[in-house]
Image (cartoon, rainbow, N blue to C red):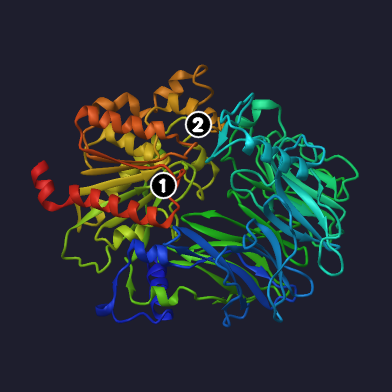
Amino acid sequence: MRRTIELALTILWLLLAVGMAPAAERRPFTVEDMVAMQRVGAPAVSPDGTRVAFTVTTMDLDANRGRSDLWIASVDGGGARQLTTAPESDWNPVWLGDGTLLFLSTRSGSAQVWRLDLAGGEARRVTDLPLDVETFTVGPKGALYLALRVFPDCDAPVPCTVKRLEAKKAEKASGMVFDRLFVRHWDRWEDGRRNHVFRLPLGEDGAPSGEPVDLMRGVDANCPTEPWGGVEDFAVSPDGAWLVYTAKVVEGSEVAWSTDWNLWAVPTDGSAAPRCLTGANRAWDGTPVFSPDGKTLAWLAMRRPGYESDRFRVTLMDWPSGEPRTLTEGWDRSPSELVWSPDGRFLWATADNVGNHTIFRIDATTGAVEAIVDRHSNRNPVPLPDGSLVFRQDSLVSPAELYRRAPDGTVTAITALNADRLAGLEFGEYEQFSFTGAHGDQVFGYLVRPAGFDPAKRYPLAFLIHGGPQGSFDDHFHYRWNPEVYACHGYATVMIDFHGSTGYGQAFTDAINGDWGGAPYEDLMTGLDWVLAHHPWIDGGRMAALGASFGGYMINWIQGHTGRFRALVCHDGNLDETMAYFDTEELWFPEWEHGGTPWENPEGYAKDSPLRFVRNFRTPELVVHGAKDYRVVDTQGLATFNALQRLGVPSRLLYYPDENHWVLKPQNSIQWHHVVLDWIDRWTAPAMVRRQR
């Protein structure tokens, strides 16, 4: 009840804060509104702690892509203004000690580092490299640390890579030859290049004073890691002498079934080869951060090799030659971000936490953990010398904005860029609930009431199932699966964090291993029964279930196990777990989840395959897939559609030749939502339900 009241008060505060119009003048939130929101990026605080630079991404519907610009605001709130307006994208702001900004931009035709003097004047290009700069940061002693994608066996990586790419482009034959895995990864075919970190010295005038030096020369591995790594994958010591980076250096095709990312240290002058710091741990080590005094290195470490969803523990090492020691063994959460306080007494971390994403403060000596900002989704904490904290926050009813937490705990908004877009919109009120699920455990979920809720009416239900499966449908403003889109279309909307979800302790996350069709399905059905019993205004005869990735798999599992839903939507979901192993790229995932390879443990794959229950498929189903999804390959979606059509089950296929595991282009997103809503509307309409019965 307390959480329900808090959420209701939060929604009321939001409505008042943005000056929302009276209820009679408001209209329900739509996918078009969602796409129109400005997407505020991570904060970069100025050296004097008074200003914050950040990226704002807007969707360009004519170009059918997102475009990002740089903004700046006072950390005290107010004065937010746009810094760049070039038609190309500007992102990745980094402050220099003199208060000027460096950033990445494509305005020269490729991604290069640019410089902007906030006192006035036009942006000036800093780098003019023949390769794109993937990301960068500024180290001590006036040096840039750049990520470039190069061929690792080149003696002169940059010119050699350019020469090879030009030669490949000139070839008439199109065949690709592979001798090892990966062949393709996430949404890109491999071509032999790797992300490497380079050091580029800058002169007193801010211009490069030499050629970039590959600090990973000859290393057949990626840093930043792929597919989503960034500057958090490497750190420069405060004295500028060392680079510590994360990379998975393994033999040949083992890259596809190993999770042994290690930390490596290399002198920033390139005078010695990298040395491994974490070789004793065969599991994942990442996110290195130096303490402000340079005496301690902290990072996140897993314990179990081969398992990408093991719990990350905060680990410390006296620099440069101490032994690793675990700081947070007793803390049953898995942090995803890590940053030191300016005085070195604390570490700040964020982690999933009972349906929220919380900012925690960790005592660097004792390991004691305290939740500092625990409601909604909070990310990218930047501590200030005065004890304040700048961070990014969003919720189910508000896109991300920047906030500041004062030392006394008071939280104030720094930005409100979406206030005008939110004004006049109506959202569904939401509340968190819990029930007793599989294994007698407490399981949590969210219920979103239809916008303009009338308790005298009966509403259909949209039942959303998250992916992962080690993930969470938390209090977050989703851009791909936004529950408010369904609530504002007239549906009661329910999301349940079944066994396997994150933020409820490692044992709860581990419970899905080898049991995909067991406890998670039980939680979903038990939770649905609980919701229907406690909310009689929901029409249990007019329900649709929707999910993507593992959620798409679960839709196919539901299809073979119950007829209680009137419509199903399967986005990028597996039908056959055995063949999915041979289709995918990161083999460590199915090997852990299903207890080995398909030839070692065929039953582990077969028992949880929806394929076994195809004969029971009866519910109308929409199948969605992207051609560039190399994680859950499109043959799984095509196979599902084939089966439905052959069985005579009403079905439709929505196929994107230009999308990956997600639907990212704004026009495609709008189309996706309209097709999905049309499908569930068709089968949950009262007249249709009567005809089915």
**Residue 454 position in % (x across, y down):** 20, 67
Q: Which residue is at 36% across, 79% downward? A: 20
Disc 1 vs disc 2: which is toward the camera?
2
State whether residue 395 is above or below residue 542: below
Type of amino acid under label 2: Thr
Q: Earlier in the sequence, mark 1 or mark 2?
A: 1
- What whole-number distance in Å separates the C-alpha atoms at marks 1 and 2? 20 Å
Residue pointed to by mark 1: 466
| Residue 490 located left or right of residue 513 | left
Residue 237 in view in this figure: no
The residue tagged with tag 2: helix, strand or loop?
Answer: loop
Please tell me how crowded label 2 is: few (under 14), some (14-19), or many (20+) other residues with Cα within 10 Å. some
Q: Are marks 1 and 2 in contact (CB under 8 Å)?
A: no
Q: Nearer the viewer, residue 597 or 28?
A: 28
Residue pointed to by mark 2: 584
Number of numbered labels in the structure image:
2
Task: Report which quarter residue 26 is drawn in.
Answer: bottom left
Q: Can you tell which mark lies on residue 357?
A: none
**Residue 267 position in % (x across, y down):** 87, 48
State whether residue 219 is above or below residue 62: above
**Residue 36 position in % (x across, y down):** 41, 66
Quadrant placement of the N terminus: bottom left
Q: Which residue is at 38% across, 52% downward? A: 668
**Residue 279 position in % (x across, y down):** 77, 35
Q: Which residue is at 34% across, 43% downward? A: 524
| Residue 326 located left or right of residue 681 | right
State whether residue 98 is above or below residue 221: below
| Residue 625 located left or right of residue 95 | left
Q: Nearer the viewer, residue 343 or 228?
A: 228
Please tell me how crowded label 1 is: few (under 14), some (14-19), or many (20+) other residues with Cα within 10 Å. many
Type of amino acid under label 1: His
